[in-house]
Image: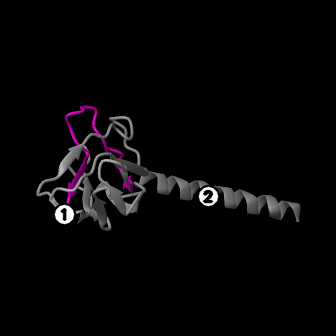
Amino acid sequence: MNAFIKIGLFWTAASLMISCHEIADEPAFSEIPEIRFEGLSHDTILEYENILTITFKFQDGDGDLGFEEPESYAIFIRDARLANFDGFYLGPVAPPGTYIAVQGKLKVEFPSLFVFGNSQFERTRYFIYMVDRRGHKSNEIITPDVIIKKPG
């Protein structure tokens, strides 16, 4: 019986090593970045008083998210009240020149949101996407509505 257990353990270990080798040769994720909305710190903000934090998850099969040059932007966010996206710097997630699948969570903070018009509050949402060093654009996510209120 002892011999059967040893043979069984050998074949189990051998098949695990072969399986791990085959998986390691292929990227765990697509080389095109993918993002998923995770949450908002608040759904209602007092202008100039509260900090809005948007949290989202990312994954990239070749790890080329983020840039060494601070003038290059990897994260793009647009307030629905505005026409254009604003770019944000993200340092390299993996060392440049490496080819490794990466995943993680990012939190983006907005410390000074305010009401644009004369009303007591405004409703908005945020559109977010990422771009990697090879120019691959991720999917775009849209946050739930956020209400920005004037104090008082």
Judge the density around disc 1: few (<14), some (14-19), many (≥20) Cα neighbours within 10 Å.
few
Q: Which residue is mark 1?
A: 119
Judge the density around disc 2: few (<14), some (14-19), many (≥20) Cα neighbours within 10 Å.
few
Lateral position of residue 79 relative to residue 98, left or right: left
Spatial CA distance of label 1 from label 2 is: 63 Å
- Is any part of residue 137 visible from this angle? yes
Lateral position of residue 24 relative to residue 79, left or right: right
How are the colours assigned in the image?
Answer: one colour
What's the amino acid at mark 2? Leu
Query: Residue 128's x, y, as percent?
Result: 26, 57
Q: Residue most toward the top? A: 69
Q: Residue at x 23, y 62 (%)?
A: 120
Looking at the picture, tell me which residue is in the foreground, 58 or 115: 115
* Label 1 close to label 2 by CB (< 8 Å): no
Q: Quadrant of the N terminus?
A: bottom right
Quadrant location of residue 72? top left
Lateral position of residue 127 relative to residue 92, left or right: left
Q: Residue at x 20, y 56 (%)?
A: 78
SS for tag 1?
loop
Q: Quadrant of the C terminus?
A: bottom left
Looking at the picture, tell me which residue is in the foreground, 110 or 76: 110
Quadrant location of residue 119? bottom left
Q: Which residues are magenta?
A: 55-80
Q: Is residue 68 magenta?
A: yes
Q: Residue at x 30, y 48 (%)?
A: 48
What's the amino acid at mark 1? Ser
- Is any part of residue 140 visible from this angle? no
Query: Residue 28's x, y, as percent?
Result: 43, 56
Q: Which residue is mark 2?
A: 16
